[in-house]
Amino acid sequence: MLAGVLCVVLVVTVPAIIREKEKARLASSVSNLRQIGMCLFEFDVEYGRLPDRDTAEEIKRVTGSPLTLSDSTSNDVFVQLLVSGIARSEQIFSTCTRGTIKPDGI
């Protein structure tokens, strides 16, 4: 009898818990996207345009970064945001979805 009640409780609660976790992941991803957008706006204010080849050279000159900066891929653009100091952590460039590579915090 107790085992049956426990099974019913599990059948009802487990899907609800899974849905709540998915909602939390989605909220985190949306928050990260919002932060990336704010970083891009701030970058535009500071450098007069969005990250590109010219801003890569300017950031390298100003910061003295040894990294190779470019605008070939979205990752290259994100690196410009990090090196410029506008984005303070690579965490905002990740999502909490299953199967994604998590940032290493470097």
Image (cartoon, rainbow, N blue to C red):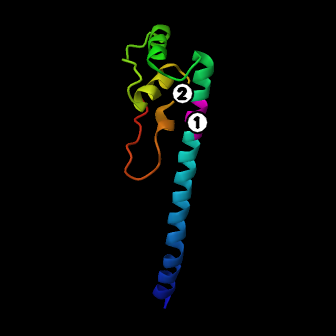
Label whose residue precedes the other's in the sequence (2 or 1):
1
Q: Position of residue 102 (x, y in %)?
A: 40, 42
**Percent position of residue 51, x then y:** 50, 22
Residue lying at 40% horizontally and 35% vertically, measured from the top left: 104
The amino acid pointed to by label 2 is Ala
Residue 19 in the image: x percent, y percent?
53, 64
Q: Which residue is mark 2?
A: 87
Secondary structure type for disc 1: helix
Is 97 magenta? The answer is: no
Callout 2 touching callout 1 (CB < 8 Å): yes
> What amino acid is found at the position of numbered circle 1 in the picture?
Gln
Magenta span: helix, strand or loop, mainly?
Answer: helix
Instruction: Indicate the quadrant containing the C terminus: top left, top right, bottom left or bottom right.
Output: top left
Crowding at label 2, few (<14), some or many (≥20) Cα neighbours within 10 Å? many
The magenta segment is 34-39
Would you call the spot at circle 1 few (<14 residues within 10 Å), some (14-19), or many (20 or more)? some
Q: Give above or below for 73 relative to 22.
A: above
Residue drawn at point x = 38 percent, y = 13 percent? 66
Query: Where does the image place residue 10, in percent across and percent down from the top left?
Result: 49, 76
Label 2, label 1: how far apart the Cα atoms are: 9 Å
**In the image, farthest residue toward the bottom:** 1
Which label sits on residue 35?
1
